[in-house]
Amino acid sequence: MSDFLSILWTQRYMVTAVILFCIGTFSLIFNPNLIKKLIGFDLMDGAIYMMLTSAGYIEGRIAPIVTDFSATPSVETYINPVPTGLVLTGIVVSVSVTAFALALVVRIYKKYHTVYLDVIMASMKKGVD
Amino acid sequence: MSTSNRFKAFFDWVDGEEWCAKTPDEVIARQKKAPVRRPTYELDSYRRFRRLNQAVGALFCITLAVVLTLVVVSFPPFGDPANPANNEVPARYIERGIEETGSANLVGGMILSYRVFDTFGESSVLFLAATCVTMLLRRDRNNTTSRDLRELRSDDRADRKDKDIVLRTVVLLLLPVSVMVGFYVMLFGHLSPGGGFSGGSILGGGLILYSRTFGSGSVRKFFNEHLYHLVKVVCLMCYGLILVYYVFTGSNGLDNHIWLGIPGNIISSGIIMPINVLVGFEVACTIYAFYALFSEGEM
Amino acid sequence: MLPYYQHIPFFSIVLMMIAGILTSIIRNGRAAMAVHLSAVAAILGANIVLFCNIVPTGETFLYQLGIVSHPFGNELVCGPLEVTLALTFLCVMAFCVLGGYKGIFEDIEPEKQNLYFVMCNLITASLLAMIYTNDAFTAYVFIEINTISACALVMAKDSGATLVATIRYLMMSLLGSGMFLMGLTLLYHITGHLLIIDIHEQVVHLTETGSYLLPLTVVMGLMTLGLCLKSALFPFHTWLPDAHGSATTSSSAILSGLVLKGYIVLLIKCIFSLFGEEVYRAFHVGDVLLILGTLAMIVGSVKAMQETHIKRMIAYSSVAQIGYIYLGFGLGGKAAAAAAIYQILVHAFTKPLLFVCAGELSEASGHRKQMYYLRGAGHRAKLAGIGFTVGGLSMIGLPLLGGFAVKFFLSDAALADSWRMWAALGALAVSSVLNALYYLPAIVQIWTIQDHGEDDLPTLPAVRPGVAVAVSIVSLALGSILLGVLCTPVGALISDGLNLL
């Protein structure tokens, strides 16, 4: 048991990311409120980026920005730059998607005066255009 | 009012409940601008359905959480140099990054040279999102009523009347700083943390600040929709052309004659600084366009 | 220097993206359409050259994007299968836009028409990138491009129904890409690579040593789930009928014919290149796909039978047809997968044909889409009626049409395995009967002569199709007939290509 707990502690960033991911997924699928769905999506993506960043961290090393140009940079000094780069790319993607989805919600609110997806579906069944 | 009711009212307020129609009848009433009556029985049926739905969802997500936790527990330990991710790929990026890309910021150098195709895709996503927001929110006869226009006009009047001296002075002091920081982050993206996207966002933030204080009319004097399209398209096209040149020469194994400069100088790092500047301008435009389209439906 | 044709995949993608960026400043919708079509035509020509160069020799090559090759930089991969898929997708793209162009210019506000073609250009670029990419993260970025532009195609009509359909589609897609990215992240943790061939090496190594088996299973599950969500496999199909049924004709055709297939092509890459088929089979993910595919074939058809709205009926039929593809993957083995890919080609031609013809038929019936009002529409718009008949019969599986070839290949492949054979053959039989039960009445309905004594339908004039629509219908119909007639050479081409993957 204490073994398991100590592993949980070592992997704390990933475990946190997993919990955040599941909260985000829950909100994205099961919350009828469109804004909260989007918050869930951002939470989910944020959790994934956290997980990705934690793949690149190495104990005791620094961010991969070279300041001393006299010698060839040594692998022992810097953390893994790949996940950081992927996160940079991913963040832009989720910003864009969020902007698009929010614009859609604005239009839907203007049309149906609500952000609850189940209410909108029910009113469409009742013949609201 | 009991404490629990108070909490409920507070949560409803946070959710913006009063602004939303809660039943189909209410949607119909609001669309016809008829007075709204709130029937409670139907509301209860929605609440019941939602509660059931969320119970199922909670079960699903807890299962997912347990499975994923088991997965991450069996993962290579956090922060260990012997992890599978720390293989020859990052080693090469670190050891030969400066000599191949000329960029002291190894992350920036990596995403703009080794993985430049991805990054071009990413810029296209941003462009695409801006286009979609334009498609949805740019004012046309489909999405604007006369009431919206009236509201916009009255807002504009209020903005013009309201000349808050404190706000204006603070913004005038902040604006040069934010523009300078934006350009700094963009231009030093290959030497220090930063790059096109972050610099562009700061620049766009400055524009939003200016527009918020002095009204969108004053922004339109130097940055209108025409210029927006021009900057966006020119930046992305130049980026695309750099990409084509870089990939074409690279894949053929030709010397690309890109001058990498002395690492650590501002003018160095070959294609990375120009791309950072181009992306920065595109992002600044896009961020401001998001703001303008969301708030007023036009640039 | 590389041979010239090896540059074609990269230049196709970038040219399409640059065309998309340029289209955003062309004010005139028709000019934007001309730019889009000429870009597609140019790339189509280039890809034909590529096809002629690599298919006879069966050559597969890697193309490095930048100064370094794998495992350090982005890369494209191209072989016979990729180029065949790319050719099909490009053809169908052009015909979808041509076939629905009237609808585009009627349904969309004039000042926003050019933006529609921005989406068309970028969707083509992202489809090509998903076909040619050899890098899992590039695949993710282009999945997102594909998602956003597909949603924009749905909402372009800008009515309440399309907006709601778009948000539902978007939410489902976001969940799908989130799952895919999570899978990719976990995979990066245990393999440390992003290029598909390097990941494959590591995955084989891991299964041989028996380490990280649980993470590997979860990764497979998450990536497959993500792509299934996006390609509307039952039970994740709920967004599809609304999105495809309410959008403008071109959008429905593009979404059904191409966008869903893009994700499936990626799934093929995942199964055969990323994990490797043996590994994928060993983890039994395929069995789940088999069950879901079988259910999709039946449920989709039953739902389609209940529909009276013609476009929604065709959309539900897509759910069933996607089930056929997943059935092919679920059966396991190269032959079944080749049948699934054949179904991708056939469906890419037939479904746009049905949507374009349905659009024309409803236009000939006063823009009404309920089955009841379509009576006699085939006599008013003859070409569209013939096209609809060909498409419907192909879906039912009449010999000499594409659908028959698929069913033949699938049942042939199913014979290899005992319990899977019964599931597959039973589902094929039931689904074919069900297909006939809703396509035949629809065909009969559109060819019934109006009897003015009995019904209250107004007499409508005959509609002459424009040249573009006629070209589109004839070519798409020809495509689905040729795929039926030439099933042996095309099938051989696909299975050779699959072996080289």
Image (tube, coloured by chain):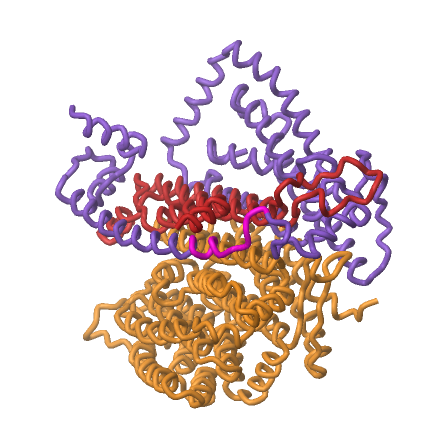
Q: Is residue B32 left or right of residue B250?
A: left
- In this image, C133 relative to C283: left or right? right
In the rendered structure, which segment of residues is drawn in magenta?
A: B69-79
Can residue C94 be seen here? The reply is yes
What is chain C's hue in the picture?
A: orange
Compared across the picture, whether C276 is left or right of C303 comes to right
Chain coloured red in the rendered structure: A
Image chain in purple: B
On-image quarter of the N terminus of chain C: bottom right
Judge whether C421 appears above or below C201 on screen.
below
Could you tell whether C221 is left or right of A52 in the image? Answer: left
Q: Residue C410: image x %, image y %?
A: 44, 84
What residue sits 45% from the left and 68% below the top? C356
Look at the picture and state if B75 lies above or below C462: above
Where residue B70 appears, as percent x and y from the top left, is 43, 56
| Residue lying farthest to the front in this orientation | A2
